[in-house]
Image (cartoon, rainbow, N blue to C red):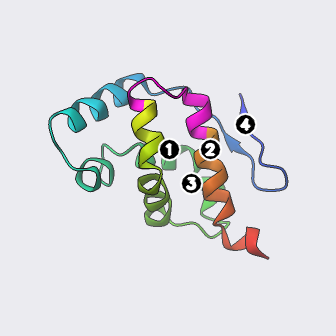
Amino acid sequence: MTFVDLGGGPRLELPGEPVELRAGLRAAVLEGRDWHEGFSHDICIGVWLWSWWQPTLEPAGCSREQFVDVVIGCRHELWRWLHGELPWEQFVTGLAGRVVGRLPVAAD
């Protein structure tokens, strides 16, 4: 099991790359679905990652909706991952850093 260690923040498990979800998301974008529609509902990578990180993030003050909003805010990096320009580990580690940086606990 690999973890994203963010130096003082919560440790988040680094799940394996969701290859099938990536293909579905990429297809949705190429079919013309807009970012907000295609990435804020059940096919959202944020919702998928939330299933991994919720036990750590929720007690730290991050809701599912807040988390998905951060993912949507990373649309450029998400796009690069979907198109194979950014490795999964780099995408998910950067996302974890953004999420942890926005936690109320991190601000204390």
Q: Secondary structure at mark 2?
A: helix
In front: 18, or 87? 87
Q: Secondary structure at mark 1?
A: helix
| Residue type highlighted by circle 4 | Phe
Task: Give the class, few, some or many, for how many residues have Cα within 10 Å of label 3's Cα (few <14, many ≥20).
Answer: some
- Would you identify the image quadrant in which residue 98 lies? bottom right
Task: Give the class, few, some or many, for how many residues have Cα within 10 Å of label 1's Cα (few <14, many ≥20).
Answer: many
- Would you identify the image quadrant in which residue 12 lies? top right
Q: CA distance from mark 3 to mark 1?
A: 8 Å
- Whichever of labels 4 and 1 marks the residue nearer the N terminus, that label is 4
Q: Is residue 102 left or right of residue 42?
A: right
The residue lying furthest to the left in this view is 31
- The residue where tag 2 is placed is 94
Q: CA distance from mark 1 to mark 2?
A: 13 Å
| Residue type highlighted by circle 1 | Leu
Q: CA distance from mark 4 to mark 1?
A: 13 Å
**CB contact under 8 Å: marks 3 and 4:** no
Front label number (4 vs 2) = 2
Image point (47%, 50%), residue name:
74
- The residue where tag 1 is placed is 49
In front: 77, or 46? 77
Which quarter of the rendered picture does the C terminus lie within? Answer: bottom right
- The residue where tag 3 is placed is 54
Q: Residue 3 got which mark? A: 4
Percent from the top left, x then y, of residue 89?
Answer: 61, 30
Q: Which residues are magenta?
A: 82-92
- Whichever of labels 2 and 3 marks the residue nearer the N terminus, that label is 3
| Residue type highlighted by circle 3 | Gln
Q: Is residue 60 left or right of residue 27?
A: right
**CB contact under 8 Å: marks 2 and 3:** no
